[in-house]
Amino acid sequence: MESKKILVSLVALVAFAVLFVSSASAFATIDSVEVSGIEALNGSPDITVVAGETVPVRVIFTGTADATDVRVKAEISGSDSVAAVTSRFIVDDGDTYSRLLAVNVPFDIDSREPLTLTVTVESKNAGVADSATISLVAKRESYLVEVLDVAMDNTVSAGSNLVADIVLKNRGREFAEDTFVRMTIPALSVETRAYFGDLSPEDQPFSEDPFVSTGNDRIEKEDAGFRRLSLKVPQGTPAGIYTVQFEAFNSDSSTTITKKVAIVGPGADSKVVSTSTSKTIAVGEKGAYAVTVVNTGSNTMVYDISFESPSGITLGASESVFAVPAGTSKTVTVEASANEAGTYSFAVNVNSNGELVKKESFEAKINGTSKGAGADATVVLTVILAIIFVVLLVVLIVLLTRKPQKSEEFGESYY
C-alpha cells in the first residue's frame, strides 16, 4: 500500500514537471505563415518556389507569456539546409507580432525530391515556443545558365594575355541552345568570346549509355561545359585594378558575373642586371658597361635605353631599341668616354612602352693617363669575363622566375 502511494506521488511529480516545462517554453503561438504572399497554413495547397530565387516569408504569432531573446527562424530543407533568422527581440504576453524573412531557395535541389519550409519561434532562454512545417514544390526556371566557376590569375602585365578557365551549367528546365560566353574589360573596351553550344537541362534523367531518348531523337546529356578564354590586355594600359566581366548568354537568357584583376606595368615581368657599375677610364678612351635585361613574362617585350648624365661625358649604347622574347635575355653594352679627368656619375634608364622598367646608376673615373695596348687588352678581357658572368646569372634568373606557359586550349570537356 505504501509503495503504491509512493508510485502515485512520483507520477504526479513527473506530470507536474512536464506541465511546468511546457508552460515555461510555450510563450508564443504561430497564427499565420505567408510564403510569397500566399497563406500556407491550415491545409493550404503546396507552395511553388523556384530554385535560386529569394522568397519572402512572413510569420505572424501571438505572445502567450513574457519572453526575452526571441527570434524567428525559417529553414528550407532539401539537398542542403538554408536558414534565415531575425534579430532577437522581447515578446510580451497577449501582443501580436509580425516578422518578415527573406529565404533563399538553393540552386542545388532535386525537383523530384520533397522540399519543406520549417518556421520556428524560439528563445535563447525558453527554447522553442511553436513551429510550423510547410510543403513546397520546387521548380526551375525554363531558361537559366549559370557561370559555375571562373579561374584566372589575379595579376596580368600590360601587353600580355589574361587567361580564364570558365565552367557553365544549365540550371534551367529547357535546353540552353547556342550558348556563348563573352569576356570583357569594360574600362579598356576589349573583349573575346567562346561558343559553348547546347547544354541539356540539369534535371534530364541519365540512361545507361551517354544518350537519353527524347521522342524520336537521341540527345546526349551535357548540362555543363568548359572553355578557356584568352583576352589581350593592350600595351600601355595604366596600372590599376580593373573589372573583368563574364556574360553567359543565348537567345533565351543572360547571366553576368564580375571579377577583379590587377594590371601592372612591364617592370613586373622584367629584370635588369648589371655587373660592374664603376670603372676607371683613361682620357679619350671608352669604358664598357654591360646591362642585361631578362624578360620573365610570357610575351615578347620591346625595350629602349635612355641616359641621365652630366655635361662633359659622352654615352652610347650598342642597341638603343631591342626586343626580348619571353623567357630570354638581352645584353646591351653601354660605352662612356670623356676628354677631361674627373669622376662622372650617370644613369641608364631601361624603358618599355613608355614606362620605366629600372634605373641603373654607374660611375666613370676618368684619369689623365692614356691607356696602351696592354691596358686595352685588359679592358677587353674584363668585359668578356663580365659578360660570361651575366649570362650565367641570367640563366639562373630565368630558371627561377619564368612562369609556366599557359597554352591556348579551345577544346572542351564537360562535367
Image (cartoon, rainbow, N blue to C red):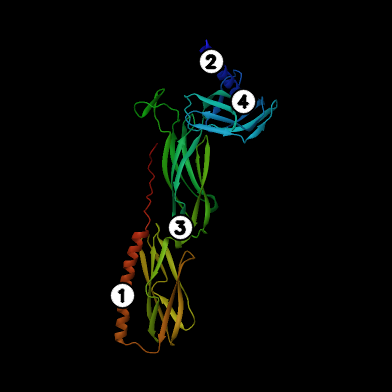
Asked if the residue at tag 1 contacts the one at tag 3, i.e. Cβ–Cβ closer than 8 Å, the answer is no
Q: Which mark's residue is nearer the viewer, 4 or 2? A: 2
- Mark 4 to mark 3 CA distance (whole Å): 71 Å
Q: Which mark's residue is nearer the viewer, 3 or 1? A: 1
**On the image, numbered disc 3 is attached to which residue?**
159
**On the image, numbered disc 4 is attached to which residue?**
24
Residue at (44%, 56%) from the top-left corner?
Answer: 160
Q: Where is 2 relative to 343, above or below?
A: above
Q: Which mark's residue is nearer the viewer, 4 or 1? A: 4
Q: Please tell me whether mark 4 sits on a helix, a strand or a loop.
A: helix
Asked if the residue at tag 3 contacts the one at tag 2, i.e. Cβ–Cβ closer than 8 Å, the answer is no
Is 206 on the left or on the right of 106, as rendered? left
Mark 2 / mark 3, whichever is N-terminal: 2
- Mark 3 to mark 1 CA distance (whole Å): 34 Å
**On the image, numbered disc 1 is attached to which residue?**
384
Mark 4 / mark 1, whichever is N-terminal: 4
Residue at (31%, 67%) from the top-left corner?
Answer: 392
Mark 1 / mark 2, whichever is N-terminal: 2
Q: Please tell me whether mark 3 sits on a helix, a strand or a loop.
A: loop
Residue type beneath disc 3: Gly
Question: Dot 4: few (<14), some (14–19), or many (≥20) neighbours within 10 Å?
Answer: some
Q: State the image coordinates of residue 26 (x, y, percent, origin top left).
A: 62, 24
Q: Where is 308 relative to 40, above or below?
A: below
Residue type beneath disc 2: Ile
Is 147 on the left or on the right of 71, as rendered? left
Query: Which label number is shown at residue 6?
Result: 2
Residue type beneath disc 1: Ile
Asked if the residue at tag 2 contacts the one at tag 4, i.e. Cβ–Cβ closer than 8 Å, the answer is no
Question: Dot 3: few (<14), some (14–19), or many (≥20) neighbours within 10 Å?
Answer: many
Q: Nearer the viewer, residue 352 or 50?
A: 50
- Mark 4 to mark 1 CA distance (whole Å): 94 Å
Q: State the image coordinates of residue 339 (x, y, percent, origin top left).
A: 43, 87
